């Protein structure tokens, strides 16, 4: 499978359909975007978790455009919010595939469950849970969530808690989720599926303007995030273009196999 390195994250160069087929073997899917890339420059735990992901795909049109600019073109942008509906449609007739939705505000997961099950015309989403604020540091609460997911026998866990909470929760708990084969970190997708939050129109998304729409929807929280991440991302891009980018977590980049493709902008193979 072709994997390319963009700054210090590896991205699978796959189409949606290739990814959906590969997910028959299971695995965790993370969806790097500009915010993730900024965080990956300083959050070592997040960085380590990313190294273990079976799949990491390009979530953002800006990243997709940037990959072209620096000479490591990513074939398709696959955002988590597009992947998730593609996933349940792809597997709608495979009754071995069932889904648990973890995340979003109280009641939103239930709404999403009803919408999805009506579309696929079966009980594909078997259960949902909206954890209380700060649950991730409460071992008892996490234990109850694990029991609930195991009890549901869901084979896919879709986690919408925002990054890096969702990736960290998957990483810490996946070994205890006995029936789950596929883990999808999907951000605000449960809100979109429920119709609780409107997604950007397709034309905005295609132009790399989904962030504008999201800021208009949630100016306080997301305005700050995009403002804080935008300029550092431009700086990172410039340093990558000039060959000056250094992975903060790789000490000797000259001797690192993964550093080579970053330095010369070539795609390398994962297997
Ligand atoms: N969320 C949650 N619990 C938390 C923090 C966040 O359920 O402790 C949910 C929140 O309700 C929303 C999603 O996580 O549904 C936030 O997604 P965000 O917009 O950060 O994700 P993105 O799509 O930008 O990755």
Image: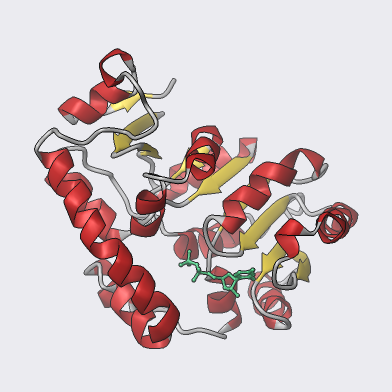
From this viewpoint, which residue is outermost toward the top?
A: 255
Q: Residue at x 61, y 81 (%)?
A: 194
Q: Quadrant of residue 102?
A: bottom right
Image quadrant, ligand 1: bottom right
Residue 126 x/y as whole percent: 80, 65
Toward the viewer: 159 or 215? Answer: 215
Residue 151 relative to residue 167: left or right: right
Q: Is residue 267 left or right of residue 137?
A: left
Task: Please state which of residues 15 and 262 is positioned toward the viewer in this rendering.
Answer: 262
Q: Is residue 235 left or right of residue 44?
A: left
Q: Residue at x 68, y 78 (%)?
A: 118
Report whether residue 196 is seen. yes
Name which quarter of the figure residue 10 lies in: top left
Q: Quadrant of residue 159?
A: bottom right
Q: Is residue 124 visible?
A: no
- Residue at 41% in and 84% down: 220
Residue 250, relative to residue 160: is it above or below?
Answer: above
């Amino acid at each position: 499978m072709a994997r390319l390195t963009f700054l210090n994250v590896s991205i699978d160069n796959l189409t949606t359909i290739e990814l959906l087929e590969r997910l028959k073997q299971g695995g965790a899917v993370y969806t790097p975007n500009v915010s993730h890339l900024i965080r990956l420059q300083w959050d070592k735990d997040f960085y380590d978790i990313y190294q273990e992901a079976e799949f990491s795909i390009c979530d953002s049109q800006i990243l997709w455009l940037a990959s072209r600019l620096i000479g490591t073109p990513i074939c398709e942008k696959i955002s988590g919010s597009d992947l998730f509906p593609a996933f349940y449609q792809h597997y709608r007739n495979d009754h071995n595939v069932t889904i648990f939705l973890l995340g979003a505000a109280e009641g939103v997961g239930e709404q999403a469950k009803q919408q999805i099950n009506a579309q696929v015309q079966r009980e594909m989403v078997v259960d949902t849970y909206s954890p209380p604020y700060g649950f991730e540091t409460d071992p008892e609460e996490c234990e109850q969530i694990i029991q609930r997911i195991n009890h549901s026998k869901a084979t896919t866990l879709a986690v919408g808690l925002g990054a890096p909470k969702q990736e960290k929760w998957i990483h810490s708990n996946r070994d205890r989720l006995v029936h789950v084969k596929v883990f999808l970190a999907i951000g605000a997708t449960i809100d979109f599926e429920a119709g609780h939050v409107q997604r950007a129109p397709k034309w905005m998304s295609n132009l790399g303007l989904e962030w504008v729409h999201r800021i208009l929807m949630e100016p306080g929280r997301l305005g700050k995030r995009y403002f804080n991440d935008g300029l550092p991302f431009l700086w990172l891009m410039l340093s990558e273009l000039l060959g000056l980018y250094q992975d903060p977590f790789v000490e000797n980049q000259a001797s690192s196999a993964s550093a080579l493709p970053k330095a010369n902008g070539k795609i390398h193979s994962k297997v």
